[in-house]
Image (cartoon, grey):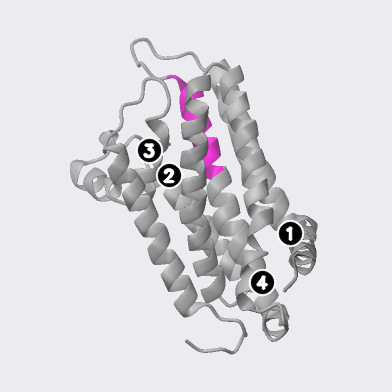
Amino acid sequence: MSTSVMRELVLLQTREFVRDRKYFLFALIFPLGMMGMFLGLERIMPEAPGSGTDLRQMVVPMAVYLALTGVGCTATAAPLAAMRSRGTLRLLGTTPVGRTRLVLTHMPARLGLVLVQVALLLAIGVAIGAVKLSALPALFGVSLLGLLMFGALGYLLGGLLETPDAAANVSTLVQLAAFFLSGFVVPLDLLPDAVAKVLGHLPTAFFADLMAARLPGRDPVHPAWLSVLVVLATAAVCVLLAVRTFRWDQGESH
């Protein structure tokens, strides 16, 4: 297939993504809104003496995390399920476009949105003194690694769940569960030992540790190489499962 046709298909997928305001605007605005809310709380709530906690430094990885999970999970899974429920996937899969190219041209719009979001969030982090300039390349790399994992999970959910509402609900549940149980909102060392041990070995906790360790005053729980390996392995497993279970037609069985 010619490059021009692929380019047109990428543009088509991008237009459809932007027009789908329900998911596009959620993925775009939610991380920025949460960041603004937490920064507002930081301004009105005095820091407890001797706490050693800088809320500004916590807000940056939290917002990036929400951006990655919002785009990778919800804004990927729900539109895919919608395309299948309308019969679009089945029809396009029988054309010369092919199924592989269809999925590949579905990705660039998500990648572009994440790059813009992460750049903006990190720029805000630098402006408020929560992120050092020297840490930007590492944080960008970690963000792309996270998008790989959460994006693979989004394609897995989008390929399995029958309706866009189901895909959106499950993806949002996964997003919020990963957010609250990864150690960003509630530090794992504040939880009972047995609970903290289990949660600390989830792939999302490894990713959270990998990102938080790039910020001032945060020491890693796991070696960086181990966290990278866990995230990559999780992404690979999700990709393999997505390929094996993806349904192109509403009535297709596994």
* Badge 2: residue crowd in 10 Å (few <14, some 14–19, many ≥20): few
Q: Which mark is residue 180?
A: 2
* Badge 3: residue crowd in 10 Å (few <14, some 14–19, many ≥20): many
CA distance separating discs 3 and 2 = 16 Å
| Amino acid type shown at disc 3 | Leu
CA distance separating discs 1 and 4 = 14 Å
Q: Which mark is residue 210?
A: 3
CA distance separating discs 4 and 2 = 34 Å
| Of pointers 4 and 3, the one earlier in the residue sequence | 4
Which portion, as a residue range, is magenta?
54-66
| Amino acid type shown at disc 1 | Phe
Q: Residue furthest top?
A: 49
Does 119 sit left or right of 177 as displayed?
right
Q: Residue at x 63, y 29 (%)?
A: 36
Q: Mark 2: which secondary structure?
A: helix
| Res. 21 visible in picture | yes
Residue 117 magenta-highlighted: no
Residue labelled with disc 1? 17
Q: Residue at x 53, y 60 (%)?
A: 171
Magenta: predominant secondary structure element? helix
| Amino acid type shown at disc 2 | Phe
Residue 250's place in the image compared with 240, above or below, is below
Residue labelled with disc 4? 102
Image marks 2 and 1: residues in contact by CB distance under 8 Å: no
* Badge 4: residue crowd in 10 Å (few <14, some 14–19, many ≥20): some
Does 66 sit left or right of 84 as displayed?
left
Residue 65 magenta-highlighted: yes
